[in-house]
Amino acid sequence: MTDATPTFESFSRNGFCVFEQVLPAKMIKDLSDLTDTILAEQDESHFASKISQGSMVMIDWALSHKHRLFAEFITNPNTLVALANLGFDEPKFGHGRIISKPPYSPQLFWHEDGRFWNDPVSYTTQPIQVFLMYYLTDTRPENGCLRVIPGSHLKRHLLHDQISERHTDQLSRFENREDPEFSFVEDEIDVPMRAGDVVLGYGSLLHASHANRSDERRTVLTMWYYPDFVNLPERTKATVALAEKRTGEVEEGSEAIEHLLEPLRVSYDGDAQPIEHELRPLGLK
C-alpha cells in the first residue's frame, strides 16, 4: 500500500506514506540513549497507567530547550525536505510523545487523533495536523509495528461507531481485551518500518499497533506537525494556536535553540475566533 516515492496524491488518498531513512544513524543512536534515560526517570505509576501505549512522555518546547538533540530532531533537514516534497514548505511543530512499548506488552488500541472535527477543513484532503512516527528500532508485527486503515481519514469506517472518542484510562490499562478497540479488522494493513524511516499520517487516520511479543523495548517518537499551517483558514489557525499554547511555553532556554526552533513555532496574531474542539467525526460519511 505504501508508495516508493510518496506524492501528495497518494498521501491524501491513503492517509499515510513512508519516507525511508530520514534519520541518520548517529541521531537514531543518540535519541535511543536519551529516551532511555528519560524513560528511566519516570515513576512506575506512569507505566502502570499506560500498559497499552507503554509510555506517553511529552516532548514539548521546554524539553526541546533542555535537550538540544530534540531541537535538532524536530528541525531535521531530511524531515523538512520530505514534507516539502509533498508541498508543505512551511510546516509548524506542535508537540510529541515518547511512546515505548516494553517487552511482551499488549497492542495499542484503535483510535484516531482528530480534535478539529467541527472545522470543515477536517473533511477535506488539506491536513490540519499530521503525525510523524519515527521508530528507533526496526519494527514488524512481532514487536509492535503500526497498523492503519487506509482511507479512514476521509471515509467513515465501522470502527468509528464502535470505539471510544478518546484514550480512556480503561483502554490505556488494557482492562478488557474484548473491547472493539483491540479488534482486528479485514481492511487493516501493517506498516513495518526500519529504524530511520518515518511514517507520515493524517491525525484523523484510524491507527493502532500490534503487541510487542519480543524481549526488547520498542520505542517510537510520535511528533505532531501542522504541515500546511500558513495556508489554513484564519479560524483554523486561531484554533490550532490555542490548542498548542500550553505545549509552546518555555520558562528559560538557550537563544541558539530558540533561533533553531522559531521558524517551526505555531503563531497567530489575527482576531479570528477559535472553533470549539470536537473529537467525534460527526460529518464523516
Image (spheres, helix red, strand yellow):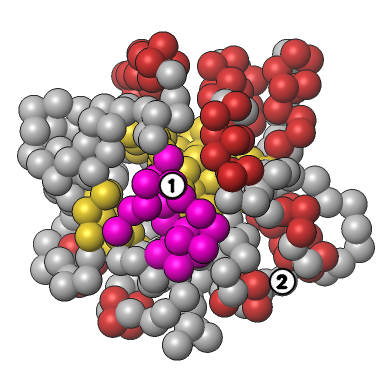
Q: Amino acid at mark 1?
A: Thr
Q: Amino acid at mark 2?
A: Ile
Residue 282 vertical position relative to residue 73 in the rendered view, above or below: below
Report the mark closest to the observer, 2 or 1: 1
Residue 257 vertical position relative to residue 229 in the rendered view, above or below: above
Position of residue 245 measured from the top left corner of the image (x, y, whole percent):
71, 46
Q: Residue at x 75, y 13 (%)?
A: 256
Quadrant in which the C terminus is drawn: bottom left
In depth, the one of 197 and 267 nearer the eye is: 197
Left or right of 140: which side holds 207? right
Whole-number angstrom distance, CA of label 2 to CA of label 1:
35 Å
Quadrant in which the N terminus is drawn: bottom left
Position of residue 178 measured from the top left corner of the image (x, y, whole percent):
11, 68
> How dense is the environment of label 2, judged by Cα within 10 Å: few (below 14), some, or many (20 and up)?
some
Identify the secondary structure beneath mark 2.
Answer: loop
Q: Residue at x 41, y 51 (%)?
A: 17
> How dense is the environment of label 1, judged by Cα within 10 Å: few (below 14), some, or many (20 and up)?
few
Q: Which residue is mark 1?
A: 5
**152 drawn magenta:** no
In depth, the one of 129 and 6 nearer the eye is: 6
Left or right of 13: which side holds 140? left
Q: What's the magenta region?
A: 1-19
Q: Residue at x 8, y 33 (%)?
A: 214
N-terminal label among 2 and 1? 1
Which of the 4 quarters of the picture holds residue 42? top left
Tell me whether the residue at label 2 lies in contact with that at label 1, contact meaning CB atoms closer than 8 angstroms. no
Left or right of 163: which side holds 142? left
Position of residue 228 measured from the top left corner of the image (x, y, whole percent):
68, 54
Q: Which residue is mark 2?
A: 275
Position of residue 224 measured from the top left corner of the image (x, y, whole percent):
54, 45
